[in-house]
Image (cartoon, rainbow, N blue to C red):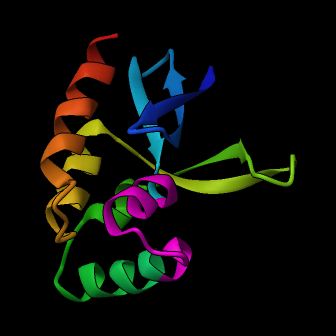
Amino acid sequence: MSDIKLFESKKVRTHWDDTKETWFFSVIDVIEILTGSSIPKRYWSDLKKKLTKEGSQLYENIVQLKFEATDGKKYATDCLDTPNLLRLIQSIPSPKAEPFKQWLARVGYE
């Protein structure tokens, strides 16, 4: 089940996986919120390279899910579950990181 959650009026595309009983979150949406970047895809691309060089296993945990974009079409989007998303958030310097983690915890219990 795909859904849109709001963090400080910003949209985060999510998907509940019944089999794994876990939420998946659009990485691009989260990066846009944390960085304020106008090009979150580029930020994510650069960050993936950096994390891979550092030996991070995060890339192996990415799941591609189809989410609706602003143009109304569905595109494959990099997504992470909550534990892996928390690891990602730690690698992004942002004053919104802590409030976002608290929001993420609430979403997980809903």
Q: Which residues are magenta?
A: 28-42
Residue 31 rendering spot, x and y as whole percentages:
40, 62
**Residue at the extreme front of the image, as rendered:** 9
Picture quarter with the N terminus: top right
Picture quarter with the C terminus: top left
The residue that appears at 49% across and 54% down in the rendered structure is: 29
Residue 51 rendering spot, x and y as whole percentages:
25, 79
Residue 60 rendering spot, x and y as whole percentages:
37, 62
Height in image: 4 above or below 50? Answer: above
In magenta segment, residue 71: no
Image quadrant assignment for residue 96? bottom left
**Residue 52 left/right relative to 55:** right
**Residue 78 left/right relative to 74:** left
Height in image: 39 above or below 104? Answer: below
The residue that appears at 24% across and 43% down in the rendered structure is: 100
Height in image: 86 above or below 109? Answer: below
**Residue 31 left/right relative to 26:** left
- Examine the residues drawn in magenta and state their main secondary structure: helix
